[in-house]
Image (cartoon, rainbow, N blue to C red):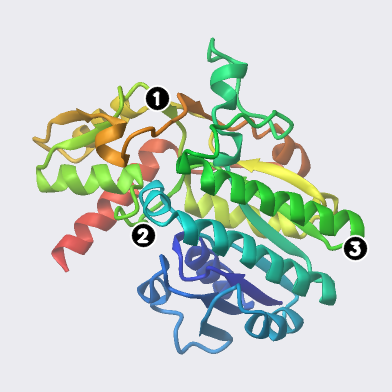
Amino acid sequence: MQVFITGGAGFIGSTLARSLHRQGHAVTVLDNLSTGRIDNLSGLLGQPHFNFIEGSVTEAPTVAPLMAACDVCYHLAAPVGVHYIMQHPVRTILENIRGIDVILEAAARHHRPILIASTSEVYGRSLDLLDPQQTRSLRESDYRIEGDTQNHRWAYANSKALDEFLALAYYKERGTPVVIVRFFNTVGPNQLSQYGMVIPRFVEAALAGRELLVYGTGEQRRSFLHVDDVVRVLPRLMACPQAYGQVFNLGNPDEITINELARLIIQLTDSSSTIRHVSYEQAYGSGFEDMNRRTADISKIDALIGLDLQYSLRDILRDVIAARRQALRA
């Protein structure tokens, strides 16, 4: 197939590009390199049936011919990381909204199947209020409960929610074959720490013998999914017409507190690092809000295509640690 990936120089996008190219598909990547890296595409650049274009999904003249030439599109382009989003609120909102407008119009015109990457952030603090006893996970049908518009913490979540509304509107009004996937904390060996991603940040600190900075109490609970599990699932989902017009969670249901995660990383790296707690205000500025839990109910996607997640949290951490150690030796 001819595959078009927006944001394909990013962490998930480049892993997907490499996987699909390895399977024999022709892959075209569009990325403006604002948070993606050309290094993520090493081994692909210059290869037959791979094409990289530096550009933005907000540019209709760039997007239109790429959409016309493809068989399927994965729209992964978006700002990433809480630090980046807090520092660039205008760019976060405008790139998401302008990009989804351009990409969906092109997909509708050429009737191309398109996967829209959304985020677990759209749930906001829903689970904290729906289930204070911490006995259930987030379902796709759960109401979204977020902070007020004066808190830029929620700008990314709301712009991605608008992406979902527009994608489903195109499906309803114009029959555009769209699939929406809400990603929950996807991690892996090539993920950068500079945008605030917790596992690479902790691993780098532990290997360097520095303090692991835990924001807030550290008792907030998260779950983590290996990027290789993600890229195995996405093409299977796009090959399933019953997925069109649907929203799916994609995450690992096994939870861990951030304190436990920090201690586990120190153990696995055999590090002498200690843990220090930092307030959210120190890390992100005044008024920052976080959710206590963010864990996916994956029964919907499992019922449709059958999930077979291959990586545990320890597997993920060992992969990230090994990759970081190798990078330090290079």
Residue 21 percent location from the top left of the image:
57, 75
Distance, label 3 to label 1, CA atoms, is 41 Å
Disc 2 crowd, CA 10 A, few/some/many (<14, 14-19, 20+): some
Q: Quadrant of the C terminus?
A: bottom left
**Is 300 displayed left or right of 10 in the figure?**
right
Three-letter amino acid code of the residue under disc 2:
Asn
Residue 280 percent location from the top left of the image:
31, 32
Residues 56 and 232: in front is 56
Q: Quadrant of residue 3?
A: bottom right
Residue at the image position 52 percent from the left and 41 percent from the top: 154
Residue matched to label 2: 190
Judged from this view, the residue extending furthest toward the top is 133
Residue 273 percent location from the top left of the image:
11, 35
Task: Check contact, mark 3 vs mark 2: CB within 8 A.
Answer: no
173 vs 268: above or below: below
Disc 3 crowd, CA 10 A, few/some/many (<14, 14-19, 20+): few
Residue matched to label 3: 174
Residue at the image position 19 percent from the left and 41 percent from the top: 269
Distance, label 1 to label 2, CA atoms, is 25 Å
Three-letter amino acid code of the residue under disc 1:
Gln
Mark identifier at residue 220: 1
Residue 310 percent location from the top left of the image:
52, 43
Q: Answer with mark 1 or mark 2, whichever residue precedes in sequence.
A: 2
Mark 3, mark 1: which one is toward the viewer?
3
